[in-house]
Amino acid sequence: MNAYAGPALITLATVLLLFVCAAYVGRCRIRFRIQAPAITGHRQFEIAYRIQMNTLENTVLFLPVLWVAAMALSSFWATVFGAVWLVGRAWYALAYARDPESRGAGFLIGMLAFGALALGGAWGVLRGVLG
């Protein structure tokens, strides 16, 4: 496990991010009295819900490429780009909560890191298959 401690740490931090996003939705649900299963009713609740869903949607794509990159290319670089993705997603969530129009920079950082992981993982896999 020591060879993959970095990606494992990034995975755990990603789970923590998902938990924090879910807790924010729950807090907004209580604060604005939005009864489940409703997902509309107050603008800030709707923002919190979109933050949670967008983060969850991105995580489903992120975790496989993180681990493919870690195993097929480099655990170190997967950890670096995984941390950049995590910072970008946290930035995205905080910016979106303050002002939805300001979420672009965090989104871009996360997407660039995701792209690096996906390309690096694909390169590592192809190199292994062809080499």
Image: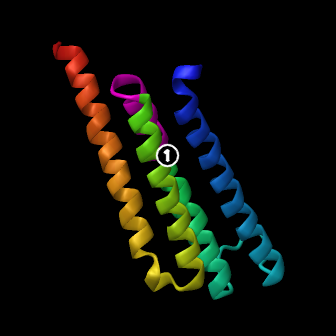
Residue 128 among magenta residues: no
Which residue is depicted at the point 40% across and 72% down?
105
- Secondary structure, mark 1, is helix
Q: Name the outermost residue toward the left.
A: 130
Of residues 119 and 6, which is closer to you in this image? 6
In the rendered view, would you say 13 is above or below 98? above
The percent position of residue 130, horizontal first and vertical second, equals 16, 15
Which residue is depicted at the point 38% across and 62% down?
109
Query: Can I make out residue 37 in this image?
Result: no
The percent position of residue 15, horizontal first and vertical second, equals 65, 47
Query: Can I make out residue 92 in this image?
Result: yes
Going by the numbered disc 1, the residue's amino acid type is Val
Q: Quadrant of the N terminus?
A: top right
The percent position of residue 47, horizontal first and vertical second, equals 59, 78
Mark 1 lies on residue: 60
Q: Main secondary structure of the magenta part?
A: helix
* Side (left or right) of 37 relative to 129: right
- Label 1 neighbour load within 10 Å: few <14, some 14-19, many 20+: few
Q: Quadrant of the C terminus?
A: top left
Q: Which residues are magenta?
A: 60-74
Image quarter of residue 110: bottom left
Which residue is depicted at the point 66% across and 63% down?
21
Residue 67 among magenta residues: yes
Which residue is depicted at the point 82% across and 82% down?
31
